[in-house]
Structures are given as structure tokens and as C-alpha cells.
Amino acid sequence: MKLLSKRRIALDTETTGLFPFLGDRPYFVSTCDNEGKLWGIRGQVDPMTRNVSWTRSQLQQIADLTEDERLPKTYFHAKFDVRHLEKIGIKTLGRIDEVMFMVHVLFSAELIKLKPLAKRWLQISDDDEHVLRAATIKARHEAKKKGWKIAEKDSQGEDPVAADYWLAPPDLLWRYGLRDAERTLLLYYLSLEELEKDPRFLRKYEEEMELWPITYEMEGRGVRCSPQICQFEISRNRIKKNFHYKRVVEAVGRPINLRSPKQLCEYIYGKLAMPVKSYTENGSPATDADSLRKLDHPIVSEIVACKAADVAIGNFFQTYARHIRLEEGLPILHPDFQQLGARTTRFSCRRPNLHAAANAFNTRSFEPIQARTPFGPRPGYLWVHSDWSQIEMWIFAAESQDEDLLADLATGNIHTATANRVFGHGRDIVAEEMKEGRSNARGRAKMLNFGVVFGMGVPAVMDFLKCSRKEAQEVLDLYYRGYPRIKPFMRELSDRAAREGFIWNRFNRRLQVPRGSAYVSVNYLIQSSAAEYMKSKMRWIAPYLRARRALDAYLVLTIHDELVIEVPAPLRPEMLLALKEIKAELENIHGLWWPELKNLPVEFKITRERWDKNEKLEV
DNA sequence: CAACTCTGCGCC
DNA sequence: AAAGGGCGCAGAGTTG
């Protein structure tokens, strides 16, 4: 009987915050077993320090469950709970199931949060949390008066109230915490039933779970991030900001908050009475850098420069500095990768979002920011970056089976080839323009190549080329004529998406397509295929490196079409050999589209000290 | 104070 | 007919 009741459990933890690597700790662990039995255990939170203490016997009781290899464990956000438990010395062994992934595999377009899901699917009301929240908010006010250390508001999406549920009356916490474990287990069984209806669902889920420990380890290693460089960049940008701000204030005649679209509007379109050239989604006059630049006024460059310095400080360096922790003498930052962060199955990255670290060398921004300077390999290591060149274009060509696009990609200079095909009609129009000191065709071709993959329509082309509707339509038609398979391919896919509400990609993933926006299915197909290709390669690389521990090499970042591996410096012959093998595997499509299409080209780069500086690497 | 929306902006 | 896809995050401003 006892064995039966322990067949499967769901676990949930309440913690003092979202950052296990920065010292937040679990103070409540709850479980629900497959007979519906609920159990919880609560640690002591010191109100002055927010430190959590557990007795030896309490830890043992938790470990008896999580370290039991034969007991499968179910979570709603497994990485969060497992990491927090790891930080209080509790291992998690045996099978792990992640309900969030199950739900994503089934309904990629759904918003995935535990309570709304449970409310909708299980008709479990979310009242318990409302009650708990209200009680916590009240308790927070009183705790503040007593000088207790309550969670502070943090603009990174952290919910300070949730991190303070320990302040609420214990009975509420018990009821609430236990019910989340219950929700999780119920959703698990419900999702499992759905997954079992199609072997492709189960397969995708298993693939994600195979990747789960790889993501977990990658985050666990983290990246070096220098707090000194962050501070230096903050000071440097403050000086820059002040310099430009002074000029702005001189022109405006009074202080103005440039981060406020409202104040900017009042000045630009009110006081200066500049003509409004573009609007936001909601119909108010736009004040973004691109719109302002259209106005061609000397104050604009000052505003843009000032804002850029402000963004550099606030969005990048300060944010990074907050996440750095000294570990064995090294300043390390652990990003939080969401393995199914996007509807298209892409990873996302948060707290901080290293997918968005500004790179001045790559941007076409008016006022480029370099936010990568603090990051780099640990001492004694290098970063090797792999990067698929034009992977989405290759997939677009392969999926549409457009041999002309494929041939142009094979030239290694896709945008030039497109320009010559679409606008030159066989002539080398790019070379001709170069001779005359113009370069119109290639830029247009590049815009079209990217734009079409994104689902760009006539209005976007009009905006880009600043031309009439008729001309924009003509340019698009020229493109479709150059690559004759593309239009029918897009049409067939969109029609299917409109009919069925989803599409399947070549990796057997089902993707939900929002009703009324069937055109996005083209992008979903391409983006998801690239994402799955990346994931399949991560599932190959991680065991490859693990099996060669002597190489001392680790995955540290995954950025859509780029992988970063930290390897010992300098590169030894056996490492170069391994990199050669890795490169060959990254390039190998294994006949996924058709036998003649063998490779997706990969480039390697190397970072020696700082992420902003890298060089080509031939292996 | 908490919870929300809007805007803008960085990346692939 | 009419549509540039996918993210995360900071700060301003509004609402109750």
C-alpha cells in the first residue's frame, strides 16, 4: 500500500525570491502524490535577514522523496524547484517531468501559467492565491514597521509579494502551497493523456526532457561578468548622458525626461510643432529613434545619444551588475534560459536577458551601445562560438524547395545574388552600382530576404523604401518572380494554417497559429525549424563533451543560431580535433530535407578575453 | 502601494 | 483583404 501511494509525486517550492544563485532560498516544500495525498514542510525565515533555516530532520524528509531514484517527480517549473533545492543541499534524482513542457508541446500558442491553466482545465479556482496575496500585502506593511527585511520591488518581473508569502498566516500558506502541488499533478495526468494521443507529441516532449539537464548544467556553469567593467561603463555612460542632456535642456529651456514618451511628445510635436510622421500602435505620435530621425532636426541626435547612454546604464550594465555573484573568487552570472520560452520552441533568456546584450559591431543603430564588454571566458579559458550563417534563409529555401534561392545561398553572398537575380535580371547590377558609387539593389534585396521570412507585406515595403503602394507591390512581385517556388509555398502553408489553426514542421512539432494571422505560419515554420535544429545539436554536443571530460569544455550560452562553448586556453590539438568533429556535426543536416542538401554552413569564432572582441577561427 | 498598460529598445 | 516573426526588460504613467 505504501509503495503504491509513492508511485509519483508533484513538488512545489515557495522561495524568498527568484534568484537561487543570489541567495534566495526555499522556505516551503509541498507535495502531492498520485492518491491525492498532500504533504508540506516549512522552514524558518529570519525576518531580519530573510535567511531560511531548516532542521536536519526536515532536510532528510525532503531528500527521502527527491533522492529516491525510483520515485518519478513532477514539477510545473522544474528548473526553479530543483535548483532551489540544490541550494539547500538537496539532490534530485530519478525521473523528472516538467508539466510546462508538456503543455507547450500540446498547445504552443497558449499562455503558460499554472494557475490560469488549472482554472481553465481543472476548474480549480485561484481564490486561494488572492486570499494569500491580500494577507501577505497586509503582513508586509506591518513587517516594514518592525524593520523586517521584506522583498523589494525589482523591475525584472520579480513579484515582491510572492517572495514574502512566508509573512502570511501559516494556514493560508499551507493551503496555497499544497494546492499548487495538487494542480501540478492533476495537470500532469491531464497533459499525459493528451500527449499519448499522438506519438509525435510524446517524442517532442521526451526530446525537451533530454535537453532539460543540459540547460540546467549550462546555467549552473554561468558566465564570467566583470563588476569592475560594469561600474566603469556606468560611469562612462553617465558622463555621456550628462553631456548630451545639458544640450537638450538648453534647447528645451527646462528639464525634460527623455524616457517619457509623453514629455517628448509635448516638446517635439507641441512646442516645436514638428509634423507627425509616424504613430504608435495606439495612434499616439511616435517618439522612437527612427521616427525622430525622420524629422531631421538638430536636437534629435542629442536626444538619441542621451537616451542611448541611459539605456546602456539602466538596461544593461546596472542590470548585469545586480546579477553577479563571486564564486570561488570569480564574478559569475547565471542566466535563466527558458527552454520553451517562445511559441516557436526557441529558447528565451531572462534575468538578465543575455540574448539581447547590445553589440555595437552588429547593429545598424544610430547610437550603438556595446554591452558585451563585461562578459568573457573564465581565466584560463576561451569561448568558441559557432554560428550558422543564414540558417533561416537556408531553411526557407529547403522548405519551399526553391532551387534558385538555394543556388543563390550556395554562392555565399545571398543578398548580392538576390539583387542580381531580382533587380539585375541576370546582369551584375550590384557591381554596376558600385562603379557608379550607389548601392541600392543589394540593400533592397537584403530587406526582401529578411522581410519575406518575417512575413512582411506591402505596407512594410512601402515604409522601408518610402515608396507608393504600387511600387512596393511591384518590388515584391519581382522578388516572387525571381524565386518562383516561394509564393506558392507560402500560400499553401498559410492556407493550411488558416484551415486547421496549426502547422507541423519537419521535426514533427505542431505549432499553433493564431486565428486570423495565418501569414505568420511561414515564419513559425522557419523559426521553429531553426530552433529545433539548434536543440538537436545541443543534445548531441553536451553528451559529446561529457564523454570527453579531459577536454574540460562546456556549453555556456545558446543564442538562437549561436552556441558558445567554454574551452581551456590555449587550444590544444585534441580540442581542435573535437571542434572539427563538432563543426561537422553542426553542419550535417542528415538528409532532413532531401539527400542532395547536405550541409548548413557554420562559422566558428573565438573570444579570448571579452565578448565584444572576437576573431575568426578555422578548424 | 500594488497591479496594470504603454512605449521604446536591445538581440536573433 | 492585409500582416515584419520571435523574445525580455526598463521606465513612465495610470488606476484603485
Image (cartoon, coloured by chain):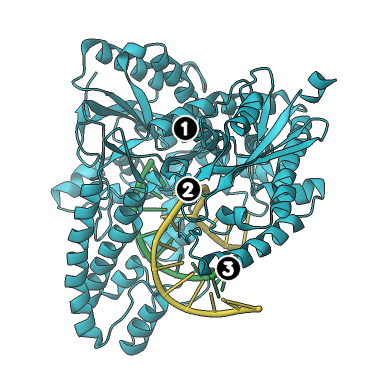
Chain colours: A cyan, B green, C yellow
Residue A597 to residue A57: above or below: above
| Visible residue check, residue A597 | no
Residue A357, position as x, y percentages in the image: 33, 48
In which image quadrant can residue A159 be found?
Answer: bottom right
Q: CA distance from mark 1 to mark 2?
A: 13 Å
Foreground label between 1 and 3? 3
Q: Which mark is residue A592?
A: none
Q: Secondary structure at mark 3?
A: helix
Residue at the (42%, 20%) spot, across then down: A541
The residue carrying mark 2 is A454
Read off the chain for label 1: A
Residue A389, position as x, y percentages in the image: 34, 33
Q: Nearer the viewer, residue A338 or A453?
A: A338
| Visible residue check, residue A273 | yes
The amino acid marked with disc number 1 is Ile
Q: Is the N terminus of chain A in the top left, top right, bottom left or bottom right quadrant?
A: top right
Q: Secondary structure at mark 2?
A: helix
Residue at the (45%, 25%) spot, across then down: A538
Local crowd at mark 2 within 10 Å, few (<14), some, or many (≥20)? some
Residue A353, position as x, y percentages in the image: 41, 47
Q: Which mark is residue A395?
A: 1
Residue at the (57%, 59%) spot, across then down: A161
